[in-house]
């Protein structure tokens, strides 16, 4: 019975865990390989971050994180402190404008 209760509690935690996604504008990256690698490494080492993808050409980083343990502002603060890039959080409508091309 004890194991059943623990198993149910674990599944409930995983089921109701709240992930959030934010898109960051990153200015100052000079090269696709090492700059994106550095950015990804710094972000993925932040406790609560689950995934980070960087689009060098557009200057975006998309981060999936646990919103119960971390806020998007915290990610921006860490990147500002640990890199030389200018980082800001983008609103959802801003990312849609940037991704289209004619």
Image: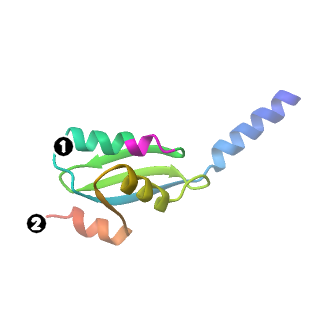
Residue 48 position, x and y percent, is 54, 46
- The image quadrant where one finds the C terminus is bottom left
Q: Does the segment drawn in magenta span residue 73? A: no
For residue 15, which quarter of the picture?
Answer: top right
Tag of residue 66: none
Q: Is residue 27 left or right of residue 9?
A: left
Q: Nearer the viewer, residue 88 or 96?
A: 88
For residue 94, which quarter of the picture?
Answer: bottom left
Residue at 30% x, 41% y: name it. 38
Q: Nearer the viewer, residue 57 or 37?
A: 37
Residue at 43% x, 41% y: name it. 44
| Number of numbered markers | 2
**CA distance for labels 2 and 1:** 23 Å
Give the residue at mark 2.
102
Give the residue at mark 1.
32
Q: Secondary structure at mark 1?
A: loop
Q: Secondary structure at mark 2?
A: loop
Give the answer, above or below, for where 72 lies relative to 52.
below
Residue 81 position, x and y percent, is 39, 54
Q: Nearer the viewer, residue 7 or 49?
A: 49
**For the magenta stretch, what is the residue range?**
42-46
Question: N-terminal of the two: label 2 or label 1?
Answer: 1
Residue 65 position, x and y percent, is 50, 50
For the residue carrying disc 1, how many other residues have a C-alpha within 10 Å: few (<14), some (14-19), or many (20+)?
few
Residue at 21% x, 49% y: name it. 56
């Amino acid at each position: 019975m004890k194991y059943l209760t623990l198993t149910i509690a674990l599944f409930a935690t995983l089921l109701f865990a709240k992930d959030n996604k934010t898109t960051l504008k990153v200015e100052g990256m000079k090269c696709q390989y090492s700059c994106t690698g550095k950015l990804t490494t710094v972000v993925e080492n932040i406790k609560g971050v689950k995934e980070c993808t960087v689009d060098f050409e557009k200057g975006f980083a998309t981060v999936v994180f646990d919103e119960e343990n971390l806020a998007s502002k915290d990610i921006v603060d860490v990147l500002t402190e640990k890199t030389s890039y200018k980082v800001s959080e983008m609103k959802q409508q801003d990312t849609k404008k940037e991704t289209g091309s004619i």
